[in-house]
Image (cartoon, rainbow, N blue to C red):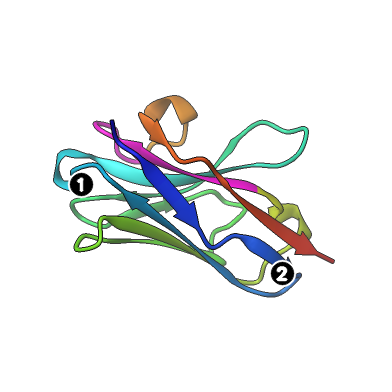
Amino acid sequence: QVQLVESGGGLVQAGGSLRLSCTTSGRPFSNAAMGWFRQAPGKEREFVATVRWSFGTTLYADSVKGRFTISRDNAKNAVSLQMNSLKPEDTGVYYCAQSRTIVNGRLSSDYDYWGQGTQVTVSS
């Protein structure tokens, strides 16, 4: 069973930065992509960003484009999300996800494995 472990969440003021990391116990070369989703209180889980494991190509939600950067580290079996210029509306639980077959997936159903989530709180 593949396990994903996130780290790096916390409390930050608006305009600040945080870096989330996610390590997978799976075999990355057999997977298509990894992504980040988030869920704010009372809202549905939404897509944030995804990276194609083999080529490193990325895709972002419009709401984070230009502020967030997703990257993968093949050697460490990990993916990171660098979040800059954070806004209060970025607050939520951030989830790391891994897809075995789908690239550029924006739907939760595109992903097969999920981490437990890490809280990000941006104060105004």
Question: Which amino acid type is shown beneath numbered disc 1?
Answer: Pro
- Left of 59 or right of it: where is 11? right
> What residue did someone put label 1 on?
28
Q: Bin the neighbour count of mark 2 within 10 Å (Cα to Cα): few under 14, some 14-19, many 20 and up.
A: some
Residue 99: in magenta span: yes
What residue lies at 81% left-to-right and 64% top-to-bottom?
Answer: 123
Circle 1: element type: helix
Tell me where the magenta segment starts and ends, as one range: 93-104
What residue lies at 46% left-to-right and 36% top-to-bottom?
Answer: 106
- Residue 108 x, y percent position in the rendering: 48, 30
Q: Residue furthest right?
A: 124
Quadrant holding the C terminus: bottom right
What residue lies at 36% left-to-right and 54% top-to-bottom?
Answer: 58
Check contact, mark 1 vs mark 2: CB within 8 A: no
Instruction: Report the front residue among 103 and 120.
Output: 120
> What residue did someone put label 2 on?
12
Quadrant holding the N terminus: top left
Q: Quadrant of residue 17?
A: bottom right
Sequence order check, earlier mark of 1 and 2: 2
Compute the Cα span from label 1 to label 2.
31 Å
